[in-house]
Every structure is written in C-alpha cells, then in structure tokens.
Image (spheres, coloured by chain):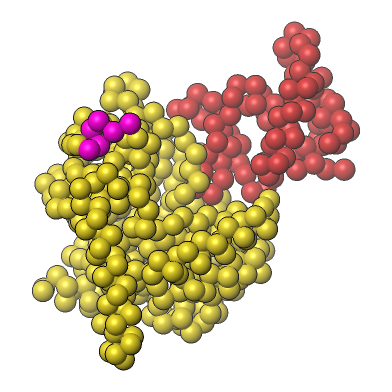
Chain colours: A red, B yellow
Amino acid sequence: MNKDQIPSLSQMFRFQWEEAQNSYVILYPEGMVKLSGSAGEIMKQLDGEATVASIIQNLSDLFDGADVGDDVIAFLSEAESNGWIEFKQ
Amino acid sequence: MDGLSLNNSNSLDKNTLNPPLWLLAELTYSCPLQCPYCSNPVDIANYKNELSTEEWLEVLRDARKMGATQLGFSGGEPLVRKDLEVLIAESRKLGYYTNLITSGVGMDAKRIAAFKEAGLDHIQVSFQASDAELNNFLSGTDSFKHKLEMARQVKKQGYPMVLNFVLHRQNTDQIEDIIKLAIALEADYLELATTQYYGWANHNKEQLMPTREQIDKAEKVAHVYQEKMKNKMRIYYIVPDYFEDRPKPCMNGWGNVFLTITPDGTALPCHSARLIPNLELPNVKDHSIDWIWKDSPDFNKFRGFEWMKEPCRSCDEKEKDFGGCRCQALMLTGDAANTDPVCAKSPLHTKLVDDIKNIELNAQNNAKKGIEEKPLVFRNMRSSKSLINN
C-alpha cells in the first residue's frame, strides 16, 4: 500500500452503524464483525475518492492533530487482508 | 451458519441480555425438492397456516428494533413465497443484512435481478452433489442443470455467493469434485455442511451416517483445499459431531443469538426445538418478539447455565460449548437437559460410539451379503402424512 492509493469497501461486504451494538460493524454472508471505535472512524472515511494520505490527514484533523498515520496504515492493511477493502490505483 | 463471529457473553441479567442477532425466517415448508436429510420436522404436513405478508413484516420490524442484524430467508423453499421481493425490500430498508437460503428452484435471471433491486445482500445456493445423477436422485428433481445456471447468474449479478453442500454417506466421497465445482462456479464461500440428525435426516440416519474412513479422507481433502484457496474462497468444513469427543456450541447457546420463526409463526430458539417436550411454543400472532425473546419460558428454559445437570454443571468447558445440543441430548438420552452424549464426559458417550459403529457394521454386512439397504425416505407431504399416521 502507498499513500496515494484509494481504498474502498469491497462489494462482498457491507459497513454500517449498529445501534444495538453501539458500534460500526462489517457485515457479510451470515456473519458480522464488530469494529472498535477507531476502526469504525477509519472505515467511515472510505468514500471511494479519498487517498490513504487524505484519510490520515482527515482523521488527524478530527482528533486534534494526533499522529494517527501508523494506526491507519496498520488497520487498512488488516482490512485488506480480510478482504473488506480493495485499493484502486 | 458457521462463521458467525459474535460476542458470546451469556449473562442472565435481562438488561445485558444479547439481542437476537440472527433471525431465521422460515417462510414456508413448501419445497419442490425432497432431500432425505431435510432439517424440517417430519410432520410438515400438519402445518398449513402460513403467516401473511403483513404478519411477516411485523416480525421483521419488531426483531430489528431489538437489534437483529442478520436475517435469513429460508424454508422449505423461500422462493415459493410470491411476496419474497416485498419482504426483502422492507428488510433492507430496516437495515438487515439479508441472506436468501435457497435451492435455486423457482428462480430465474429476472427474479435474481428483482431481488437485487429490492436490496438483497447475499444468496446461498444449495447443491445435493457434484454431478447431475446423484444431485437429481437426492433432491428428487431434475434440478442440477438449473442450479448451475442460477449459481452463474448469482455471481454475474454481483452478489457474494455461498454454495452449500450437505454431506453424508452417499456424497462424502465426492468431496474433491464438490470443491472443484465450487471453484469453477467462483463461489466466495463453500459450506461443506455435515448432516445434522434432526427431522428427516434422523429418520434416514442409517443410510446417511458416513463411515469413519470416509470422514478421515474428506477432512484431509478439505484441509488441502482450505490452504490452497486461502484468500480466494473460504471453505467451511466441520467434522460431524457424532465423531468428536466434545459437543458443538449449539446455536451459540440457547436464547443467546438465534431466533427462528417457523412458517406458522411459532418462535423457536433453534429450528429443531419443536421436538423438545413441554415447550409452550409461543407464536408471534399472540406475543411480541420482545416478550418471546426476553420473558417467554421457552427461551429461558436452557438459557445461561443454571439449568445444567452434572457433568456439565461443574465443567470448566461449559462456557465454550453450553453442554452441546439440547435436541441431540433429548433424542439420544431422553432428557433435553442432559449433557449432549457427543461429549466424552457424558455417561452415555460410549453407547453413542457403539451405535455409530453398529450402523457402519450393518452397512458393511448388508453390502457383503448383497442385501439392499432400506430405501431413503424422501421429504415430501405424502411421506410426511404416512409418518404422522404411523
């Protein structure tokens, strides 16, 4: 993964807020993964246009300039290996 | 229904009770197929009154309000219901992840597109075998070719696809061809489901129970392909629990995750539970889903750990497997509150092992002597009526 790539949700998965779980979840055939708070915030940034770099920037702005780069990259590569997301470019 | 990774807390406190995350809507017991391992009850001919569209919509709304997320449309064959498109559309609007669990019979490219339009998320197509001859024999229909076409359409129209094969003595040796077929059809998930001996399958147990040798071979093949297909197709394969020495965590615990609504509106903690005696069998026509899940005697009967007898009660593995399956405990020991005898800690485990061995020996002896096996009883309304009358 490089920072100019654009991650997007794979067609095989759904991402949504679940009130009863009080968290974001990834849904797939007959299954569900509950995301942690930060994982949910990262997934929320995937709009099919934002690059990895801009996602990091957005989240840093959102969390008072915190250094989130490593966490974002670690989560996105895990999400990719789970098949949840794909990279364009 | 494997692969459901959900939290397993099993608290008795009603305020922290898990919601019914998995809603299985058995829309109808009608089915054009006649699979002899069907998990529906053998007395399907007794249930004629199906819930109306309006009644189903109310079930869907109420369960979603409680936090149900995964929704399975099942049966029988759910495609028989003409209002399936309406139910899918409402479910999607409510925020469910919608799964259609089907034989593919009753579907065509146009209907698959209509389901997509309505918001269906996933289609699971079941096959009976890897070739037309055995598939058509087991299903009692000429359905193999149509199933292939439907599986291709499901993928072509962009759905995630699960292929499901129920394995038993008659088709376990085909496992490699089955996996190759799933690869050729570009399945995203392959469920090599073990026959569970409830309903029709229990009636046909002697002809369906695989041999130890078959299972050992099949397991090896499954593991080879699980490795080979990593990241391409997920293969679920579980050794039949009769051949294990610890029971399955049935339904992830009674009244913990699963809620089944049968065609006539009866709410069950699992789709086989109707066979357990002295249940009150609450119906959605008379009670709210909320009351059924939280307060009904049925859903509390085996919830948590208080109901357990020894050896489960003091067992340090009870939170892992919940004592196994209540229906199996009933069928094999006569008491649903006993330890599932699949568990080596059950005093009845050795008897179960002997029974399985005897089924295998009988099959071998019959084959040697050229005695034809008792024929399979196919699942249809005629056999159901005759089983009810006997």
Q: Is residue B331 left or right of residue A39?
A: left
Please tell me in which quadrant of the rendered image residue B76 appears: bottom left
B81 to A20, vertically: above or below = below
Residue B328 x, y percent position in the rendering = 25, 53
Magenta highlight range = B311-316
Residue A43 x, y percent position in the rendering = 68, 30
Residue at position x 47%, y 64% in the image: B216
Residue B192 x, y percent position in the rendering = 49, 61
Q: Main secondary structure of the magenta part?
A: loop
Q: Is residue B188 left or right of residue B252?
A: right
- Viewer-side residue, B75 vs B128: B128
Residue B98 x, y percent position in the rendering = 49, 48
- Asked if residue B200 can be seen in this view, the reply is no
A55 to B287, vertically: above or below = above
- Viewer-side residue, B314 vs B136: B314
Q: Is residue B50 left or right of residue A65?
A: left
